[in-house]
Amino acid sequence: MIELLILYELNKKVLTMYGISKEIHNEFSVLTTPSYGTIKPALNRLAKADCVKTQKTMSQGGRPSTYYSISGTGVDMMKELLLEQPLENPISFLPTARVKISCASVLNNKEQIELFNLLKLKSENISLDIKKLLDSGDLDYYKRMAFDNLICEYKNFISLLEGLIRASKN
């Protein structure tokens, strides 16, 4: 997910690592807060994959600065990351799906619909799995309450996705 966020920010403008961190924090802090220790290795991976270009300069104070920009390969990678199959781990699914929705503006309408349908299908599957657990009757009171709440969360998320699909079709 960090690679997607970095590419998304670099798709808008050229930034230093500090600038990338600041932009991610400004736009996505309610969803994720990656540290420099996460951003730097991800930038290195993206540079190795030719998704990011670097330019080293000297600042006015005489300190070296590295500026990062997205390459054509990086734009393709960003779209691939957005449209890849959702994660199997239900714990990671909703936060990752929310980030993907937040970055969907870089996709064309057809790609947006594809993304939203992928996320909807996975949400429906997870919701069915939760319902099966609830129907089994083997849950104590607290698990039942937690899973009931989770079903509500997925119903709301599916409703959001259906609205996004309709909006992308218009």
Image (tube, grey):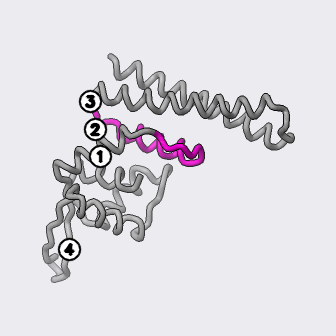
Report the Cα–Cα distance between label 2 and label 4: 28 Å
What residue is shown with label 3?
Answer: 108
Three-letter amino acid code at disc 3? Asn
State which tag comes first along the sequence, 4 or 1: 4
Report the Cα–Cα distance between label 1 and label 2: 9 Å
Report the Cα–Cα distance between label 4 and label 3: 34 Å
State which tag comes first along the sequence, 1 or 3: 1
Q: Which residues are magenta?
A: 86-107
Q: Helix or strand or loop: what does disc 1 sit on?
A: helix
State which tag comes first along the sequence, 4 or 3: 4
Label ID, residue 42: none
Q: In front: 41, or 95?
A: 41
Q: Position of residue 72 (x, y in %)?
A: 16, 48
Q: Position of residue 93 (x, y in %)?
A: 53, 43
* Circle 4 residues within 10 Å: few <14, some 14–19, many ≥20: few
What residue is shown with label 1?
Answer: 78
Give the total number of marks visible in the rendering: 4
Whether residue 118 appears in this view of the structure is yes
Do residues under tags 2 and 4 come within 8 Å of each other at their CB atoms? no
Name the residue located 30 percent from the left edge and 63 percent from the top edge. 45
Q: Helix or strand or loop: what does disc 3 sit on?
A: loop
Of badges 4 and 1, nearer the viewer stands 1
Does the magenta stretch mainly form a helix, a strand or a loop? helix
* Circle 1 residues within 10 Å: few <14, some 14–19, many ≥20: many
Name the residue located 29 percent from the left edge and 26 percent from the top edge. 109
